Amino acid sequence: MPLNPTQYSERRDTLALLLRETADALRSVSDEAQYIQPGLIQGHITELLAIRNKVFEDQFKLVLVARFQGGKSTTFNAVAMGGRVISPMGDGAIKCSASLIAARNCEDPALRGVTLKWRTVGELEHLCADVLTSGPIDLTTPTGLAAARAAFEAEFELYQASRDRYPADKIELLPIVDLITRFVADPALGEMQQRLAANPPSAAGVAKLVRFPDNFSMRWPNQAGGFTLEESLFVFLGSTNLADESPSLKRLGLEVVDCPGLFASRYDTSVATAMIATANAVWYLLDGKAAGDGDLKAIALCRQLAKNALFVSVNLKADINPTRKHITTKIMPHIEGQLAQAGVPVALQPYHALLALLSQTGARLLRGGEYADSTTFMRQLVNDWSLEIDEPNAAGYWSALCEHLLDRLKSGVQDFRAAGGQLNEQTLAIVERESGLTHILGQLEQFVVSSRAHTILITRGVNEAISAVENGVEKPLAALEAVANQDEKTAYDKYDEAEKALARFEQVVQEQLEFIEGGQGRLLDEQLAEEFFEQNILSAVPGIASGSADEIANRIKTFRIISGYTGEWIHNIFGQQTAKQIIQSIVQRRSTEVIRLRAVDWMKQLGPEKSQALATMFKQADRINNNLQEFWQVGAGKNDELEKLGNPSLPVDVFEVSSFSSFVENTLIKDIGITVGINALITGILTAIAVLLPGIGTFFVAITATVSALFLKYSGLTSTGTGEKINIELCKVLNTQLMVERKNIIDRLLLPEATSGISLSNFRENIVATLNAPIKETRIRFNAQRHDAEALFQKASSEREKIAEDCRRLREERVVPLRLRLEAYRSETEWAWRS
């Protein structure tokens, strides 16, 4: 292991201090070097401070995943919020998530705050479609909304008539659809959203905004009409991002995401899947009971998407036998066996989410801090469990809850009582130990260090700082010193020559970039989209057909049992059109699910070895880069002014990477014009897939017409026989229609209708932006140096001599030592990394 967490923390703290000192020193230089454009040095000072802040911020995304009541929101409040109860922890009766919540440490007070993102109408329609399966959902028109509300009322009647037989996946969303169709067109909704955008809530305000209304399960459905719009905002909130000072997140540089519960709905599952796909690591929390099929599938999904960056813990809570010994010796080995048998070998970690939360709350109380939300939460638990307390205050609640939970665990309770049973350093240490949080965070920290330390400390850290010092101060000072020692005509002639050379270079850049822009670029985009179509859509047909056929066959069997009809029973009961809608809904959902998973793997592993299109892009980009380097070296070698600007070309190994993800990682060091990061690409394209197929030409018309005929034809067969027949026919029609729609699908992948504009074209556009960025930076530096030189010649010769001497002194005595210190740090860190 190159660095352990302690060494990494020391190296990171040293870098942060060094960057702060460098920024302060450059500010001092800027005050003295009045003849350099103020914005030039200040821009690099700002850059240094941004690099310094970034080492403590969201360099690593951890996504918390669990089924309902699995403890992920409790863990989010412990890890991300330092014990504050912000993320809703459910009311235990209705299983549905409110919204995605993310938190990161933010060093700059000016950038701290809360950002809300509301669900689009399309996302709300997607949620409704999981319940209202009778036809397309349209919430944008009065007619469509009235139809959706009528469909909900009909669905609600079905629920009321047979609550015990109503599908479990629908009951979890039925009240959500109720609130959506009730309030989506309310003008007050938009007004509230605008008001919150203008005045974002505090963290405490977020807690109220994302939680379900009080007594939600008791009030719905009997008092459904009593919910106010303000109480129902959580339904329309897609995500909440909190940027604040957070010691726990600063320690690891984490962004922690509490994503919607898997299987709350197909929409929530798609959101969670996209988030897992973009995570650096996933922490899956099991609930202390035997893992069900859903858990096994979910962990397998996380393993597929996160690869080796998966941590799985078992929450030490259980209804029957909640002791640590029983869970760790009986339950955990059983779950590990289940996972191994399912082909997902994972080491499980014991963990108690509520004790973890209390450990963080207790630590804050010991430091003299107290949050009203945490105290209210603890008081509520004390009352719910009828616990006796010595003092009705936060510390008293804390002690009673910890002792109660440790007693249930039959672990640590004697130590807790022996240490006084009240909040103190000893009892807090026992709670931390028994929670298992420190151990899991230690493992996570080791993983962060092994996978990200070099990028954070070197690539995005000291290398950029050295570049800022060289390009922002050292070379401009050297250029001014040289100009000040020249006569005016010679200096102007050199700058004129440099201007012509730089203009020629920029012209060559544009000519070179034509190889991956214009018509050629469009062909490369189409080639990449063709690969996507072949490898992720067309090849998904067997999986789509098999899953759809089984579900359709089961639907036939179920309806036959319920109705008692044979032969053309579905036509007699529901009519042909409804059969088509049912089939379209099934095939559409299966298509999205299967293609989504294939697309995630494809995008995360996309590299020159697996994609001829990307290999061509990288090969041409590397050739362009080499040509530019050669052309620059020839031009700069003939002109001192260009040589002082530094080499604008990219490092020779920028395009020698294993995947597009690593390319973005290696180049997205600062804002150089990258159009879309790999995380946004994955999320955006996954979102596009969810709406891609249903809107394409006659795709589903042909499928539903064919399969609905089969629906009737094979209704007399057994479920197995029906599935086999439908599978064969569905494979044929899927392949046929996909080939018919091939051109339309590729066009949609390259020119999406979504307002985000994210598409497969962004892959090539990022490469072009990477090549263009250093050229643009070179032009900016040249213009700044020429401007300063022209200002210099407005001064008397004696003053120019003094400026030349000042430039030399500042450069040699103040700036070069700064750069040498940074280079020494880089050498020391590289040595520590390799040793």
Image (spheres, grey):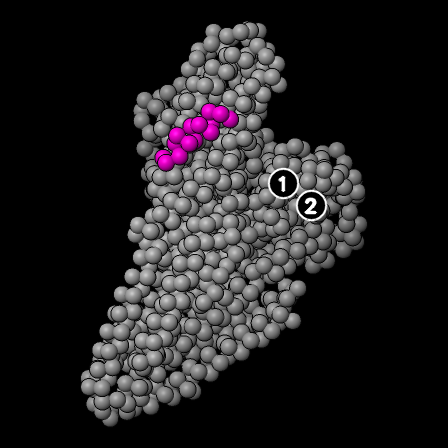
Q: Is residue 681 visible?
A: yes
* Residue 795 drawn above or below residue 281: below
Determine the residue positioned at 28% across, 90% down. Answer: 485
Residue 689: x %, y % from top left:
44, 37
Magenta stretch encompasses residue 732: yes
Asked if the residue under mark 1 is in contact with the one under mark 2, i.e. CB atoms within 8 Å, the reply is: yes
Query: Residue visible at 56% across and 68% down?
Result: 12
Residue at the disc numbered 2: 346
Q: Is residue 602 one of those drawn in magenta?
A: no
Specify whether 514 is left or right of 125. left
- Element class at badge 1: helix
Can residue 137 be seen by looking at this rendering?
Answer: no
Q: CA distance from mark 2 to mark 1?
A: 9 Å
Where does residue 528 sit, x and y in percent of width and height? 42, 46
Is residue 170 found left or right of 527 in the rendered image? right
176 shown above or below 597: above
- Residue at 43 percent of width and 13 percent of height: 576
Rendered view: 563 above or below 396: above
Residue 224, numbered label: none
The region drawn magenta spans 731-744
